[in-house]
């Protein structure tokens, strides 16, 4: 409708100019003075009117663009005065301004929201211009972690803490790394990761800094508490009978020595007591050797191997253990070409340990079955699963299942799953447990 109104008005003015020019041409051809004067006057008026009509629209558009240039979106264009097409044009300008103001307001709200979140997180964040060193933004956690006052340029850090400056701003960390920063009177262990991004014609570097000193200390303390609790329990179980037997034998010998006519000591009793002490001492030695074996595995020798070959090897190794068992061991492999890069010897040790645990868990279960499978996880990384339909693991001991020396078996050493976890960590992977009582357990090795 606006376009038609504008086109109609423009057409009228063009026709008026055309008529005036025709009148002028008639006067010139027929040498008619009044026609020449009238045609000239009307032509000037028509050209001026057409010029004003056209230029007024351009001035309105130029005025709007000027406000956009200076981001003056608060301006309001009059919608109730002037020609209809200009009113509609003003309505369009106001709608654009209103939309831009709404977008800008929403963007500002999102920025404030994001800024508040980044201020609240317990992770230090800083972004700065790579060329000039000017700080674009940093949160309080960054300043608090490094004990810095607020600064506008990273040269501030270079002058006061050159070592920290080199580690943070001069060194590029493609992956998250753990480093130790030398503070004024102490050292601080942190995780650092950074990335470079472009905005307009400038390059910026974003650094994320996380203080892991307290977390490491807390986790280490909890691990030591669990370890010492289990070790104390095991050691006390061995020392208590040794102490009791030693006191009994010493008391018998002392009484025999104090009598005026010593009775002949029962050598069989003494021999039995000494044998018991010897056995318990050997148990303590075995416990110590078992503890030492946890520290033997320190590196892995990875090679590529097909899952089918690995499963065939495990199947052969497990045959002697399954001869007198009713357990059904099933290996499932959908992709025969699936290949892993791992330390074959160590992973075989892990799988044998997990299958033996599954055999024990299915003892007394009707139709006991163990399934070993290999495939790709949802992250497209390799995984091996050992599942059974055994008794399952009680929920109250799930948190302790990987603690060294913790075992629910009477004859267990308690290092099997701990060793499995350590081997998986050395492979850069992890081990996960899913278990329900009386339904079974699934152990996943994620590479």
Image (cartoon, rainbow, N blue to C red):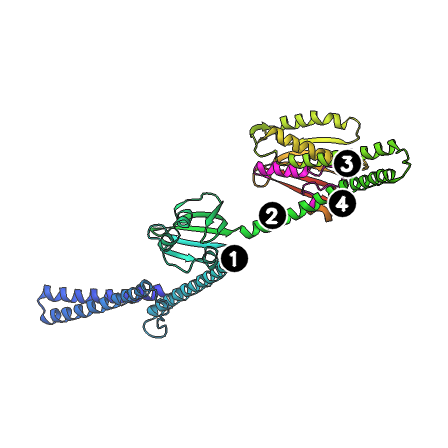
Instruction: Please tell me whether residue 245 is drawn above or below residue 165 in the rendered image.
Output: above
Any mark on residue 121, and which?
A: 1
Specify the quadrant of the image occupied by residue 13.
Answer: bottom left
Residue lying at the far front of the rendered structure = 260
The residue tagged 4 is 437
Dot 2 and dot 3 residues touching (CB under 8 Å): no
Q: As drawn, is 324 to the left or to the right of 131?
A: right
**In front: 363, or 140?**
140
Query: Spatial distance from mark 4 to mark 3, Cα to Cα?
Result: 34 Å
Mark positioned earlier in the residue sequence (2 or 3): 2
Query: Spatial distance from mark 1 to mark 4, Cα to Cα?
Result: 39 Å
Instruction: Please tell me whether residue 20 is drawn above or below residue 375 in the rendered image.
Output: below
Q: Nearer the viewer, mark 1 or mark 4?
A: 1
Query: Spatial distance from mark 1 to mark 3, Cα to Cα?
Result: 53 Å
Dot 4 and dot 2 residues touching (CB under 8 Å): no
Q: Residues within 10 Å of mark 4 (few under 14, many from 20)?
A: few
Instruction: Please tell me whether residue 80 is drawn above or below residue 246 in the rendered image.
Output: below
Q: Secondary structure at mark 2?
A: helix
Any mark on residue 220, and which?
A: 2
Q: Position of residue 126 (x, y in %)?
A: 43, 54
Query: Spatial distance from mark 2 to mark 3, Cα to Cα?
Result: 31 Å
Mark positioned earlier in the residue sequence (4 or 3): 3
Mark positioned earlier in the residue sequence (1 or 3): 1
Query: Spatial distance from mark 1 to mark 2, Cα to Cα?
Result: 23 Å
The residue tagged 3 is 280
Q: Secondary structure at mark 1?
A: loop
**In the image, residue 425 lies in the stretch drawn in magenta:** yes
């Amino acid at each position: 409708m606006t376009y038609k109104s504008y086109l109609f008005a423009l057409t009228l003015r063009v026709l008026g100019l055309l008529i005036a020019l025709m009148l002028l041409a008639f006067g010139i051809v027929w040498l008619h003075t009044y026609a020449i004067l009238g045609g000239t006057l009307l032509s000037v008026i028509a050209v001026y009117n057409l010029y004003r009509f056209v230029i007024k629209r351009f001035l309105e558009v130029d005025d709007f663009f000027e406000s956009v240039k200076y981001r003056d979106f608060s301006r309001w264009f009059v919608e109730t005065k002037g020609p209809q097409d200009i009113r509609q044009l003003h309505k369009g300008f106001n709608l654009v301004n209103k939309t831009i103001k709404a977008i800008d307001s929403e963007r500002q709200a999102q920025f404030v929201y994001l800024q508040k979140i980044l201020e609240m997180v317990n992770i230090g964040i800083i972004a700065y211009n790579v060329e000039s060193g000017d700080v674009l933004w940093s949160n309080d956690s960054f300043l608090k972690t490094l004990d810095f006052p607020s600064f506008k340029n990273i040269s501030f850090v270079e002058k006061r803490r050159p070592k920290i400056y080199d580690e943070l701003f001069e060194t590029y960390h493609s992956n998250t790394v753990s480093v130790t920063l030398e503070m004024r009177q102490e050292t601080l262990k942190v995780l650092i990761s950074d990335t470079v991004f472009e905005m307009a014609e400038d390059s910026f570097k974003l650094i994320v800094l996380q203080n892991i000193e307290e977390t490491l200390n807390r986790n280490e303390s909890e691990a030591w508490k669990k370890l010492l609790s289990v070790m104390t329990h095991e050691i006390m179980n061995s020392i208590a009978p040794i102490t009791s037997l030693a006191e009994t034998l010493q008391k018998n010998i002392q009484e025999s020595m104090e009598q005026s006519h010593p009775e002949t000591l029962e050598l069989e009793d003494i021999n039995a007591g000494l044998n018991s002490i010897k056995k318990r001492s050997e148990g303590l030695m075995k416990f110590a050797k078992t503890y030492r074996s946890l520290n033997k595995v320190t590196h892995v020798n990875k090679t590529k191997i097909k899952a089918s070959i690995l499963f065939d090897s495990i199947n052969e190794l497990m045959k002697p253990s399954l001869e007198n068992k009713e357990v059904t061991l099933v290996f499932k492999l959908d992709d025969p070409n699936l290949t892993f890069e791992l330390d074959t010897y160590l992973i075989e040790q892990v799988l044998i340990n997990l299958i033996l645990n599954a055999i024990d868990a299915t003892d007394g279960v009707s139709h006991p079955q163990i399934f070993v499978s290999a495939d790709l996880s949802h992250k497209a990384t390799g995984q091996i699963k050992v599942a059974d339909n055994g008794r399952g693991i009680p929920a109250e001991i799930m948190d302790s299942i990987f603690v060294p020396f913790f075992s629910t078996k009477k004859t267990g050493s308690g290092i099997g799953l701990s060793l499995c976890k350590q081997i998986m960590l050395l492979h850069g992977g992890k081990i996960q447990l899913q278990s329900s009582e009386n339904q079974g357990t699934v152990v996943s090795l994620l590479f």
